[in-house]
Amino acid sequence: MRRIGILTGGGDAPGLNAVIRAAAKVLFKHGVELIGFIDGYSGLVEKKYRVLDRWAISGLLHRGGTILGTNNRDNPFNYPVKENGKTVFKDMSDTAVKNLNDLNIESLIAIGGDGSLAIARELWEKGAKVIGVPKTIDNDLMGTEQTFGFDTAVTTATEALDKLHTTAESHHRVMVLELMGRYAGWIALYSGLAGGADVILIPEIPWKLENVVKKINQRKEEGKPFSIIVVAEGVKTPEGELVVKQRIDESGDPLRLGGIGQKVAKMVEDATGFETRVTVLGHLQRGGSPSPFDRILATRYGVAAAELALKGEYGVMVSLINGKIQKTSLAGLKTTTRNVPTDSEVIYAARKTGISFGD
């Protein structure tokens, strides 16, 4: 029987289970066995896996998270190994490739963001037959117009803004909502526009405090003594400082951003006299059931990845390009962040409706 492997790497995102389900349904029709590796690439290195039968994928479409587990630390090319009671990091990529061969797995579907897909590309260069599926709530991955998980994160953030509006208006306060997104402002921009924010601060547009204050005071003069500010976690201070909450050196992305919301709130309160409160939405943006859009996009990705595996087309990533599912070479995939274009039509629409970006 033919065997194909699948894993989910990096941070979780709504829609991961929908990809697994869609790929499985396609492969089952061709008599192919699907092997799911547990906890991302660590399952591949340590040969931890489960056979995904029809019962395993039943009821997955609406479920958030991933039934396979995931992590964003265990890189096979820099893998933590215990030696003499200490943790050392070794290149275990040969073991990962050998495990695929030992299990008679003809190809691997790797679902992940930039870090996980960079690992997939390196494994492909070592001879593993890999197909990538793009995933991140941050929507910052090059090679595709949109990743699944993003729409759900925007929906969650927009719902939070709807709730913050009522308390901001009731108490005549400035409410600051800090959102995820790493070094890109996609979630902040889209949810800020959908949720009626007055100020949106994103990493792509440098800002000045006086411009934010001007917007808040303008609203006060118009009889609106409250304001909503959306801040992406990767926004720098007006002085150019990146605010870091924590550093985890063994991680592929060692900087844990966080805290810019508090800084913005303090500056705004000191400059305006408005009572200011901060909400950090955090991992709520990753959780819950995927939106209908993300369920559909994840299903399209899963079907396309399975069909490529059946055809024997490897070293590629399925992508959304011009609204259609296509394939992109893993070898040519850029590792740079896909930032929001400053000439984006969404930014244009936001400005025209009175939203300030602090510039």
Image (tube, grey):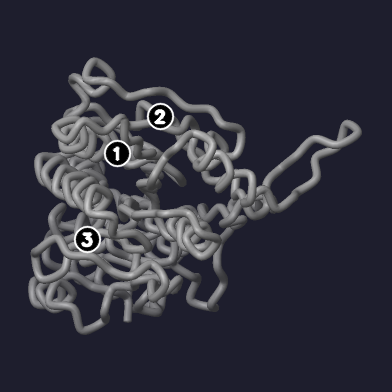
Q: Which residue is drawn at 28% across and 73% down?
A: 340
Residue 68: assigned label: 2
Left/right placement of residue 357 relative to residue 238 reads: left
**Above or below, 258 relative to 213:** above
The one nearer the camera, 139 or 58, is 58
Q: Residue at x 9, y 77 (%)?
A: 352
Q: Which of marks 3 and 2 is nearer the N terminus?
A: 2
**Above or below, 83 relative to 55:** below
Secondary structure beneath dot 3 equals loop
The one nearer the camera, 108 or 143, is 108
**Above or below, 291 relative to 351:** above
Amino acid type of the residue tagged 3 in the rendering:
Gln
According to the image, label 1 marks what residue? 16
Q: Residue furthest top?
A: 55
Residue 146: assigned label: 3
Q: Which residue is drawn at 53% across and 77% down?
A: 240
Neighbourhood count class around disc 2 (C-alpha, 10 Å): few under 14, some 14–19, many 20 upward = many
> Which quadrant of the structure image shows residue 61?
top left
Q: Which of marks 2 and 1 is nearer the N terminus?
A: 1
Secondary structure beneath dot 2 equals loop
* Disc 3/disc 2 C-alpha distance (Å): 23 Å
